[in-house]
């Protein structure tokens, strides 16, 4: 397996092996040890056209428990990986729409269950399209693989009780939603009106650093390492040695910022609170600031 291309925006990041270019993907489409996977907020995009040979992860139906509001459990995660033709040794490269925010959520889930080699294609669908690269409409034929997952790592996921303790200790909380959501003017994100919270605002003490701050709007790629350090370290004073919890409304945008902090900037104690505002904004007696 050749290494990812470390050039352009990937240079000087903490873990360059987790970020690949569209060119790298184009050169590895036929590698049996590599599985390209698309994960979108809207699965109609995959059906309309996807990278040739790419499998699909349905963010709504495949990554979450069908009854409880929770992630799929370890046993169902194993079955999912097997259906997608992914083994423990497979290099999984994720990409998607909306600047890779759902792809980042899928990466967080794979890391939660211990998959070693997971990467993101910088720029996602937008960059692949912008460069005029080919699309396919037929779903690939994928054989069933063998896969064994580890139990979910609590080092990557924050639950509400931990968030309460984190807030009371005045440790860093990063609210990655839009400023109107942070101020309590909007109770849901446009894509998911059914997931509106009863109260608006933010967790006391949380800083508002919208997740889109980390990407270049024109092509969806991540900003350079110096730009990211200027935003998160210099401007807001976050430091890689401190525990940081990110959150948004349903956990997918905050996983994008979690990826930036963990793999691009080298934070070793970042966690994603996937309960996020749909949980906190509906909790009885949970403290809220506006």
Image (cartoon, rainbow, N blue to C red):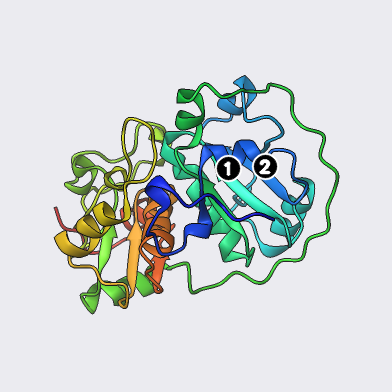
Q: Residues within 10 Å of mark 2 (few under 14, many from 20)?
A: some
- Examine the rendering and report whether any part of residue 90 can be seen: yes
Tell which of 241 and 174 is nearer to you. 241
Q: Residues within 10 Å of mark 1 (few under 14, many from 20)?
A: some
- According to the picture, the residue beneath numbered tag 1 turns out to be 24
- According to the picture, the residue beneath numbered tag 2 turns out to be 28
Q: Residue 105: x and y, percent?
A: 50, 51
The residue at 35%/57% (across/down) is: 247
Q: For the image shown, how many numbered marks are present on the structure?
A: 2
The residue at 35%/41% (across/down) is: 196
Tell which of 259 and 168 is nearer to you. 259
Kind of element beneath mark 1:
helix
- Residue 13: image quadrant is bottom left
The residue at 21%/55% (across/down) is: 231
- Examine the rendering and report whether any part of residue 61 can be seen: no
Tell which of 135 and 26 is nearer to you. 26
Q: Which mark is residue 75?
A: none
Q: Is residue 259 above or below residue 122?
A: below
Q: Is residue 42 above or below residue 161?
A: above
């Amino acid at each position: 397996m050749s290494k990812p291309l470390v050039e352009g925006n990937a240079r000087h990041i903490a873990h360059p092996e987790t970020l690949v270019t569209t060119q790298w993907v184009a050169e590895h489409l036929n590698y049996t040890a590599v599985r390209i996977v698309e994960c979108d907020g809207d699965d109609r995009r995959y059906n309309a056209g996807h990278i040739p040979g790419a499998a699909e992860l349905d963010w709504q139906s495949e990554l979450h428990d069908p009854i409880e509001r929770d992630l799929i459990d370890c046993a169902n995660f194993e079955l999912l990986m097997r259906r997608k033709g992914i083994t423990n040794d497979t290099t999984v490269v994720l990409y998607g729409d909306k600047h890779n925010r759902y792809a980042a959520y899928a990466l967080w889930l794979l890391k939660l269950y211990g998959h070693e080699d997971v990467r993101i294609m910088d720029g996602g669908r937008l960059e692949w399209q912008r460069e005029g690269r080919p699309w396919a409409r037929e779903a690939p034929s994928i054989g069933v693989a063998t896969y064994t997952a580890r139990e979910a790592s609590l080092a990557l996921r924050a639950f509400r009780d931990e968030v309460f303790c984190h807030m009371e200790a005045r440790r860093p909380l990063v609210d990655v939603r839009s400023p109107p959501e942070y101020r309590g003017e909007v109770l849901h994100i446009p894509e998911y009106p059914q997931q509106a919270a009863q109260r608006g605002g933010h967790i006391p003490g949380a800083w508002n650093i919208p997740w889109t701050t980390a990407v270049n709007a024109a092509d969806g790629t991540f900003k350079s390492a110096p730009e990211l350090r200027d935003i998160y370290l210099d401007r807001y004073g976050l430091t890689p040695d401190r525990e940081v919890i990110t959150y948004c409304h349903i956990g997918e945008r905050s996983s994008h910022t979690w990826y930036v902090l963990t793999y691009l900037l080298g934070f070793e104690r970042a966690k994603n609170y996937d309960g996020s505002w749909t949980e906190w904004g509906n909790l009885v007696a949970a403290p809220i600031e506006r």
